[in-house]
Image (cartoon, helix red, strand yellow):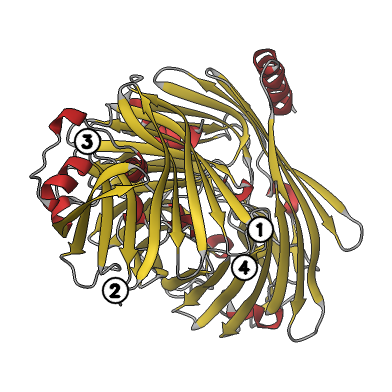
Amino acid sequence: MKTKGFILILLFIASQYTTAQNIDIGGYVRNYTGVMFEQGDFSILQNTLNLDFTTSGDKVALKANPMLYHYNADSLSLTMRELYLDLYFDNFDIRIGKQQVVWGKADGAFITDVVSPLNLTEFLLPDFDEIRRGVNAVKFDYYLGNSTFEAIWIPNFTPTETPGAGSIWYVQPEFPVMPTFDWSKSSVNPSLENSELFIKYAALTSVIDFEFMGGYTWDDFPTMHVAKQVDMSTGAPVLTGLDITPQHHRLYLGGGSFSTQIKAFVLRGEAAYYNGKYFQTEDPFAVDALVEKDYLHYLVGLDFNLGNVKISSQFIQETIMDYEEGMLKAENENTMTFLARYDMLRETLHLELFSYIGLTNEDALIRPKITYDFDDSFSILLGANIFVGEEDGRFGQYGDNSMGYMKLKYSF
Amino acid sequence: MRKLQITTAIIAIILVSGISSDVISQDLSGKQIIEKVYNRETGDDQTSDLTMTLINRSGSQRVRKIKQFTKDMGDVEKSIMFFLAPADVKNTSFMSWAYDTDKSDDQWIYLPALKKTKRISSDSKSDYFMGSDFTYDDLGDRKLEDDTHKFLREETMDGVDCYVVESIPVDEDYMYSKTLVWVNKSNFIGVKKEYYDEDEDLLKILSIKDSEEISGIWVITKSEMKNVQKNHRTTIGLSNVQINTGLTESKFSERMMIRGL
């Protein structure tokens, strides 16, 4: 509440500067209808109103981006995606308020891009401008030539949002016995001590673009502390209960990214090293069925043109350092992404194929789509999300959720 | 997002031309004429509003509006442009650093929906810009040595005395087999250009519709590219042109791409 009050005061101050300036209003209205192939059920019936209010001057700017979602059962959901104030100075800028921060050079993967948590209630299917959650933060940027030093302070931790029970994207964990959940430690108390801090140094040069980053943050996903209840009355241990306590833990991470052009190719890379991340294990001697390990997440990607087709491909690896037998997550998990895009009819018809390919679990999410621009404001998109492969894979587990969908969009 | 790749420098090549009229010679070769067209004075910096109108064979129109800034820094020319319309590309920005050497241009695009600045390849200049009839190369900084230039004749075009020069690409796989350009003898502005396809059939005609002298430099303020084979065309209009206003180097940075106008 203190943060909200602080933002309101800032908005009031900003209004004193901006009352004489015009407010620029843009956005879109969108209908999004999806049907699952197997059951024929609607996977989504959604209408969206996205409004983007901006007003800016030489010294200050203000942005508000409310989004209103209307679902099939007349339910309305209002989200303030962003609401912030920009203050401009000669060599530095300050942004205060709810904001989305995007770091790194990866496309469709989140490696050093960890400042804004994700909304995974519809898995990875929303557009990437909708999949991030805004965070209340103070962002400071200092500029020196073509380089930027950035520091971000987030006073209250916002976790990644996951699908709730009842969602087609919720995956029911399997337990050998009925567990009992203790949610008392599942949230992080907002306090100065519990705030998050990120720093980044970035530069655009004539040879290469690069970023170095570091973060003192919380794991966006809660760690599941598991206490086992064992009955020894028969002589042999028998598992009789599980007490599960979800709890977020602190993480330190450092990393960087780069992008450079080599002849007709754009080569990209990105890596993040996490210090002390918790992983679940089946080791019976592990406290709370957890082990703490360092973790490396990296990517290399290549963008190029094949005739008039734009191609982009990335290789992504997640590696657990000092791996131990019994850990539930694989030591190495490899994924590829592939994007092909072709524009035709004077760029009114767009064909696109994007895929995540799970190399470790031999599964994939294949996303073909066709977009036709009736005019500069109105477009129709026909697409499909096809999940294939092993049922225990990240994508294959949603094999029943393969769907076709249509999006009608009016931009203004 | 390659469709948004454009350099203000290019638009300047076609649309901004100026040279003093006292250098006219009757004995210029084709290469010398084109060299004078290419090496004209354009000022140290330039700001303008660009309106690109795509007109199809039925006459319906689509309009793109851009605010563009260019600065010549000696061995590098930096450009930045901000897309104002249509709505779905509004606040997108594009920055280009074009070098005098053989080094490829550096190009970046800022996508406001993704909140990301991406380095993009400056290759594939045969692509059409934003669905228009202009390719990136039509709009771009084509080098003198990329073609073999031949003076054909002198000709009067709409009352203007012109040199007519034929340019044949050195690269045999280039998208055009040849171009013919009509150059105003008095100021070395190209007033008309014909583009021939790989079968040596006429493909497109670029016509200069209007020009103004601003701060002592001739600026073409209205032009049209017509595809005669598909019968659609694109007009480009420049307005609010300002030259040598003292744009600072900091204008051409990622900070400004993100901040916008």
- Disc 3 marks which residue? B40
* Mark number displayed over residue A36: none
Residue A303 drawn above or below residue B188: below
**C-alpha distance separating marks 1 and 3:** 39 Å
Marks 4,2: beta carbons within 8 A:
no
Circle nearer the viewer, 1 or 2: 2
Task: Name the residue: 16% across, 51% down.
Answer: B144
Q: Is residue A371 left or right of residue A282?
A: right
Name the residue tied to disc 2: B200
**Residue A284 or A108: which is nearer the viewer?**
A108
Asked which secondary structure carries label 3, the reply is loop
Q: Farthest residue in the right direction?
A: A74
Residue A371: which disc? 4
**x and y percent of residue B126 in the render?**
34, 63
**What is the spatial separation of the Cα atoms under label 1 and label 2, in whole angstroms?**
34 Å
Q: CA distance from mark 1 to mark 4?
A: 12 Å
Report the Cα–Cα distance between label 4 and label 2: 34 Å
Q: Amino acid at mark 2?
A: Glu
Residue at numbered disc 1? A375
Q: Identify the chain of the residue marked 2, using the numbered disc in the image.
A: B
- Secondary structure type for disc 1: loop
